[in-house]
């Protein structure tokens, strides 16, 4: 029995020596595998870049529609409740808020509108208010500017330009007599509005 186990032991030892003397393959990637991975990553980047730009553009369009919706609501509220509503833009802080005035009160004064539907709006950092043009006031591109919605069913003629970080512009135009709001792609100033 001893002899047999010594043979087995010697045989295993020679197998260990044989394995140690053969060079092991180094772990890693071949040049071809790396080239394929880099190609796939480049292809994915090429396909996703238009969507990233489209996301920024969608954010700009969303803010323009949000402003248009707020203005349409204010037009209806002013006429329906016989109030003067004021949309106040803080251009430097990229936001706007609503104030209300009851023209039939003893001391009519504008006060912040505290209704849930008139909460102040803060635009995302990628979108800013480039300028606001109100007929009779002119164009303002910094500071605070406001325009009114009247109980008789009209609004101050106003044009707002929103701009995103890449320089794309959306124009929001308010019709004074009908209260209709147009969201226009690009930098547009209607005829008759001062620049």
Image (spheres, helix red, strand yellow):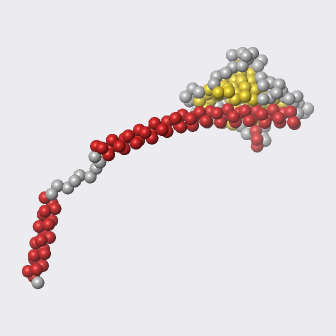
- Image coords of residue 183 (percent x, y): 70, 29
| Left or right side of 5 for 46 | right
| Rendered view: 99 above or below 20 | above
Residue displayed at 86% across by 33% down: 79
For the point 84% across and 33% down, which residue is it? 78
Farthest residue to the bottom: give it: 1
Q: Residue furthest left?
A: 3
Give the quarter of the image for residue 148: top right
Residue at image position (66%, 34%) is 63
Which residue occupies the foreground of this view, 116 or 181? 181
42 vs 76, left or right, is left
Residue 190: quadrant of the picture: top right
- Indicate the quadrant where residue 96 lies: top right
Q: Quadrant of the C terminus?
A: top right
* Coordinates of residue 34 in the picture (x, y in percent): 32, 44
User: On the picture, is 190 further left or further right than 26?
Assistant: right
Would you place residue 34 above or below residue 185 in this image? below
Query: Residue 92 appears at what percent x and percent y?
Result: 64, 28
Numbered disc total:
0
Q: Residue at x 91, y 32 (%)?
A: 104
Residue 1 shown left or right of residue 61 in the figure: left
**Is residue 130 visible in the rendered structure shown here?**
no
- Residue 162 x %, y %: 64, 28
Judge whether residue 71 can be spotted in this image.
yes
Q: Nearer the viewer, residue 90 or 168?
A: 168
């Amino acid at each position: 029995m001893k002899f047999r186990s010594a043979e087995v032991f010697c045989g295993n030892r020679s197998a260990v020596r044989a394995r140690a003397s053969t060079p092991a393959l180094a772990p890693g990637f071949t040049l071809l595998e790396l080239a394929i991975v880099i190609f796939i990553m480049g292809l994915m980047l090429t396909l996703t870049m238009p969507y990233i730009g489209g996301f920024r553009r969608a954010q700009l369009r969303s803010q323009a529609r949000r402003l248009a919706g707020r203005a349409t609501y204010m037009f209806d509220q002013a006429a329906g409740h016989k109030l003067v509503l004021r949309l106040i833009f803080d251009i430097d802080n990229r936001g706007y808020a609503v104030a209300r005035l009851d023209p039939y009160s003893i001391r009519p004064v504008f006060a912040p509108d505290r209704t849930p539907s008139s909460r102040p709006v803060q635009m995302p950092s990628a979108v800013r208010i480039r300028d606001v043009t109100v007929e009779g006031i002119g164009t303002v591109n910094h500071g605070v500017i406001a325009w009114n919605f009247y109980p008789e069913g009209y609004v101050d003629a106003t044009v707002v330009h929103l701009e995103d970080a890449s320089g794309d512009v959306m124009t929001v135009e308010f019709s004074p007599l009908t209260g209709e709001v147009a969201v226009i792609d690009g930098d547009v100033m209607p005829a008759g509005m001062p620049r």
